[in-house]
Every structure is written in C-alpha cells, then in structure tokens.
Amino acid sequence: MALSNLEVRHIAKELKALEGARFQRMQRTAKGYRLKLHGAEVMLAPPDAVYITRYQAKGETDGLSAFVKKRFGGSRLESVEQYGMDRVITLAFDNGWHIAIELFSAGNIIVIDDDGLTRSALHYQRWVDREIKPKRAYKYPGSRGLDPTEMTEEAFAKIFDRDAIRSMVRGIKMSGKYLEMACAQAKVPKEKEPSASEIKKLFKAVKQVVSKEAEPCLEGEPALFPIKGGGKAKASLSEAVDEYYATPEPERKKESKYDHRLGEQEKAVGMLEADAEKYQEAGDWIQGRAQAVETLLQKVKELRKKGLKDKEISKELGSKVRVSGKTAYLALKTEKKDNKASADTN
C-alpha cells in the first residue's frame, strides 16, 4: 500500500497541525525514519507513506539521522507543503533548511540547505532530467498527468482514448479507487469509453471527490472516504495509515487492481530512467574522449591488417578492451559504477 496523490494532500494538511513544533531527533526504524517533534512523532516511510504515528518502535542512529540531528537541532517546523499534486512532501524549518520526502519510484529523503542544495539523502540518484547528489541544487521531479484541483474541463476531455477508468488513471494524478468512486457518482460505466455528455459528468464528479471533506477510515486499506462500506472510521488519515502498518501483513487486504497496475508502471518508469542514465553516461564518456577512441579504433585496424585475431588484439590493447568481429567493447568508469560502451571497428 502506498499513499496516493490525493491522500498525500490530506496527510500534508494533517501535518500542518505540527507547524511550530521543535525538532528533537530522527532515528531509523524497520519501517523507515521516525522524526520526533515536540508533542508528536512522524513516520517517514518512503516510497509508501508519511504519517503521524502513536506506536512505539525501536530506532537507531545512522548517517542520515545523525546529519539531520546536527543540522536541525533546536529548530522549529515552519511549514509543511505538498509539491503540486505530486507524491512529495517538504518540511521547512526555521533555520532555512528543508527535508523533502519523495513517495515515488524507490522513494527518498533529501536534506536541503538554505541555498537549495542537497546536503544529504537516503539515496543518491540520477535521472535524465534531475539528480540527487551532494551540493547539487535540488530539483523537484517532473510532473505527469493532470492536477485534479486545477485541471480545466477542456484538458480533462482530451485524456480519453479508451475506457473511462483506464483513461483517468493514466491521465489524472488520482488513484483508481477514488476515480472509481467518481464513475459511480457520475453513473458512468467505468469499462466503456465515455461520450461527450458523460465526460462532463465525470469532470464534475472528480472535482466533487477532490473537494469532498475527508472521512478517514480503514477498509482493509486506509481510505479518505468509506468506499466499500463496513470500514472502521478513524479520526485522521494518519491514524488509519498508522493502524494499517501496525497490522500483520497477512491480514491486510489487497489494493485495487488499478492502483497495483499504476504502482508497477511507476517501477517500470524508474527502471527505464535508470537505463537512460546508464546509456547517457556511456555516450558522454565516448564524446569526451572522441580522439582517444578514434586512435584506439585505428590501432585495431592496423593490428588486423597484420593478421592478428580478435583475442590477440584484445590482449595487445589491454584488459579494458575486447574486440569481437566488427565491434570493440570498451570498459569505462563512471561516477556510479563501471559501464560498457561499444564502437564500430570498420
């Protein structure tokens, strides 16, 4: 179970009640990191959730929590904000520093200084359009899908290219269970592509769901509103999430198939972004050493004219080069790890 965009929005509202509380400590636990403020404790559990917790858990200090204690000791929580409608919450303190919690892909906790630079993180990462590295400017992730709080009816109508539920899951920053709720409220079949009049009904229903006053409950999984019926009402969404994670895993109910599919798609996107980064690094390495690569390829051609075979050429050029047929494989070292690049020997 991972908090959806709409649920993150409500959690951020609940955390606002803690603004003004003084930082005390942060410790690593089995579920993530436990941030203790005066009067409350907040569980940071990327990529799944952020919530106020009342359950006790054994914690320990690691590198990230020690750094946070050093930099935030004595400071007060100044503000809590969700980035747009994305699954990112930022905790701003009165010392000018921030803690960003990213609840997507592998999840992350990033410490940002008063100049907007990353100073520490749970994971150092790099994508095509952003990177999380020490002393690099922190950049929020690129946004996918429509923000349901701001979208226009015209933009909403353009997302439909298949049945109602799948079009909305792909096109709007909302989870399947709340979009199914909108379909039911609008009395529009979720399995069929909607007509123009039905799209108008869906637009109105989605807006109503987004603006609806929360009625937090636990229906196997935490929810903002009673959807299935028979759930346990909770005083806050944090309380529902807290109890969910305190429940043994075999007793938890499965998530909506649409939410599961969306989660799998997010993981796939993360893998593709990692591959893109790897190939970008290889390309950058070759481009920056174009002359050296050209010289190496010329050497391969000369050795071939002398009658040397591929294995002999590889041995002659050293362990970092392997020649096979028309291709020379070059082992290159990047910032993250060793990668391989290839070049045509023709």
Image (spheres, rainbow, N blue to C red):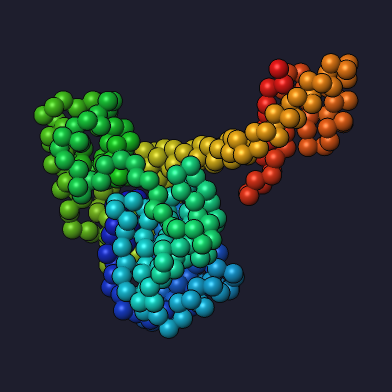
Percent coordinates x, y for residue 43 in the rendering: 44, 67
Residue 264, above or below 30: above
Percent coordinates x, y for residue 166 in the rendering: 31, 32
Quarter where residue 217 is shown: bottom left
Residue 199, above or below 88: above
Instruction: Tell which of 137 and 183 is nearer to you.
Output: 137
Q: Residue at x 40, y 69 (%)?
A: 114
Residue 125, above or below 325: below
Specify the quadrant that holds the C terminus: top right
Q: Is residue 64 left or right of residue 343?
A: left
Percent coordinates x, y for residue 106 in the rendering: 50, 50
Instruction: Tell which of 257 and 61 is nearer to you.
Output: 61
Can the viewer see residue 185 in this picture? no
Can the viewer see residue 74 in this picture? yes
Q: Is residue 149 left or right of residue 286?
A: left
Instruction: Tell which of 227 and 289 is nearer to you.
Output: 289
Quarter where residue 297 is shown: top right
